[in-house]
Amino acid sequence: MSSVTALDMQAEILEAERQLAATTCKLKENEQQMESDDERMFFLLNADRAREDFYEIRSSKHGEIRRIVLNSNAEIVFDSEGKTVTEGSGVLPEFDEIGEQFLRIIPDDSAGRDYYRKIRGLMTPRKIPEDAPTSARQEMKRVMRLELEAAKEEGRQLRQIIVENFKSQDCLERQGELDEILQRKSESEQEQAKLQASQQSLQEMLLLLQRKLKEIELKRSQEEAAEREVKRKQEHDGRRLAWLNRFDPPARPSSIVQPNTFESCSIQETDARSDGSTSCDDCRGVVDEDAEINSDFETLSVQ
C-alpha cells in the first residue's frame, strides 16, 4: 500500500515541478516584456532629444521619381536633382527607421509640378528682352530677384507647414503608443503579481510533497526492516530446532514383544535405562553447550 502511495506522490511532485517550471518561464517572459516596454516608453518620452527626424517628399516626372528630404527645421538636406540643397552636403542621410504610412507621390501634371516647384522654392524664370532699354532691363532683374526671394520664402513656409503636420501626426502616434504601453504595463504588473503568488504556492506545495514522500519512504523502509528481522528470527529458530532434533529425535512406535521374553526385556530395559540415563544426561549437557555456542555464533554473525 505504501509503494502505491509513493508512486502517486512522485506523480504529484512531477506535475508540481512541471507547473512551477511553466510559471517561472511565464514570469521571465513577463519581466522581459516589462523591461522592453520601459525602454520603449523612455525613448518615446525623449524622442525629440534622442533622435533626429527627416521628411521625404516625392514627385513623379516623366516616369521617374524625384525627391527631396527635409530636416526638422524644414530645410532641404537632399535634392535628387541637386539644385536646392540648403543644408549639409546634399548626401542622403542614413535612416535607422523609415515610416511609409503617409507615403504618397505628387502626380506628374501641371498642378503637381507647380506644387513641387514651390516646395523647393523655385520659380519659372522669365526672359528679359535683349532690345529693352537698360533701365527697363535693370528693373526687370530687380523684380525677378524679389520674386525669387518671395518664391524661396513661400517654399520655406510650405515646407514648414509640411514638417509641422508630420510632427503633429508623429506626436499623436507616440501618445497612442504610450497609452498602449501604459495599459500593457498595468496588465503586466497584475499578471506579475499573480504569477509570483502562484510560484510561491507551487514551491510550498512541492516542499510539502517532497516531505511527505520522504516520510512514506522512511515508513516503508522501517516496515521492510521489521519484516526482514521477523524472517531472520524465524529462520534462526528453524535452524536451532533442526539442530536440536539431530540429538533428540522424536519417539518411534515399539515392536511387538513376545510374551515369554517380557520379563527379561523388562529387566534389560531397566538396566539400559539406568545406564543410558547417565550417558544421556552427559550427552545432553554437551549438546546444550554446543547449542548455546552455536546460537551465540549465529547471533553474532547476523548482528
Image (tube, rainbow, N blue to C red):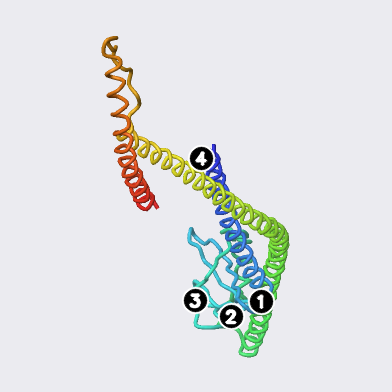
Crowdedness of circle 1 by 10 Å Cα count: few (<14), some, many (20+)? few
Instruction: Name the residue that disc number 1 marks.
Output: 48
Q: Earlier in the sequence, mark 4 or mark 3?
A: 4
Residue 247 in the image, given as x and y percentages of width and height: 30, 35
For marks 3 and 1, give the one nearer the viewer. 1
For marks 2 and 1, give the one nearer the viewer. 1
Q: Callout 4: helix, strand or loop? A: helix
Q: Earlier in the sequence, mark 2 or mark 3?
A: 3
Front in this rendered view, residue 196 or 156:
196
Q: Callout 3: helix, strand or loop? A: loop
Q: Callout 1: helix, strand or loop? A: helix
Residue 36 in the image, given as x and y percentages of width and height: 60, 66
Q: Are marks 2 and 3 in contact (CB under 8 Å)?
A: no
Disc number for residue 128: 2
Instruction: Name the residue that disc number 3 marks.
Output: 82
Residue drawn where x is 54% and y is 79% of the image: 85
Q: Amino acid at mark 2?
A: Ile
Residue drawn where x is 64% and y is 56% of the image: 204
Q: Callout 2: helix, strand or loop? A: loop
Residue 210 in the image, given as x and y percentages of width and height: 56, 52
Residue 151 showing in the rendered view:
yes
Question: Marks 3 and 1, how far apart in space?
Answer: 29 Å
Q: Earlier in the sequence, mark 2 or mark 4?
A: 4
Crowdedness of circle 3 by 10 Å Cα count: few (<14), some, many (20+)? few
Disc number for residue 3: 4
For marks 4 and 3, give the one nearer the viewer. 4
Crowdedness of circle 2 by 10 Å Cα count: few (<14), some, many (20+)? few
For marks 4 and 1, give the one nearer the viewer. 4
Front in this rendered view, residue 221 or 139:
221
Q: Earlier in the sequence, mark 4 or mark 1?
A: 4
